[in-house]
Amino acid sequence: MTNPHPLAQARHRDTETRQHRVHQALAEMSADGSEITVSHVARRAGVHRSFIHRHPDLHSAVIQAQAAAGTAPSPRATKIGQTSLRTENANLHAHNRRLAERITTLEHRLSEALGHQAFHRAGLAASTADLRAQLTEQTQASIELTGRLERREAELADARETIRRLMNENNRA
């Protein structure tokens, strides 16, 4: 299926052009007896080595051309390949860790969003607002009753004081 987007089409054409240059470089190198390695083919084709490594068909074509020329990959090339594989493996592990953290964050956000949605759909949001209004009313009533109680206690204390004074006056007389 072709992508109708012009940028995708341009990228596809560029990839095809570079693949053609790699195949052409391989044919020329096989014909003139040059040493065939991924680095040499990439240099001759004007592409980066990673381009050949990213395309398994190109990489296998280089390996087949090496075998046909009777040259095995040098130990240094094998070492570089192992080193790059280790580096790529480490990078992939780090990338997987970052993706796992991102997934955890997104799962947490989704869970919160679904919780809020369920809370509102269940009508609990309205109930909460009603409960808060009732709480405010009850708090206000409590404050008013506390004020009335304090005034009554003050009146009671004044009445007791008046009774004590009158009892003292009565006992003296």
Image: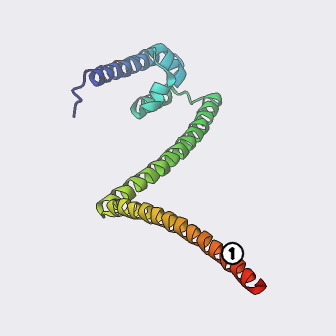
Location of the N terminus by quadrant is top left
Q: Does the rendering let one see residue 32?
A: no
Location of the C terminus by quadrant is bottom right
Where residue 118 appears, x then y in whole percent? 33, 61
| Tag count | 1
Question: Which residue occupies the extreme right position in the image?
Answer: 172
Image point (24%, 25%), residue name:
5
Q: How is the image coloured?
A: rainbow
Q: Is residue 159 above or below residue 56?
A: below
Question: Which residue occupies the extreme front position in the image?
Answer: 173
Camera-side residue of 22 and 154: 154
Image point (71%, 77%), residue name:
165
Q: Which residue is mark 1?
A: 161
Q: Does the rendering let one see residue 25?
A: yes
Where residue 33 appears, x then y in whole percent? 50, 16
Where residue 158 appears, x then y in whole percent? 64, 72
Image point (60%, 36%), residue name:
87
Q: Amino acid at mark 1?
A: Glu
Q: Is residue 30 above or below residue 75?
A: above
Camera-side residue of 164 and 26: 164
Q: Which secondary structure, mark 1?
A: helix
Q: Is residue 69 above or below residue 107?
A: above
Please tell me how crowded label 1 is: few (under 14), some (14-19), or many (20+) other residues with Cα within 10 Å: few
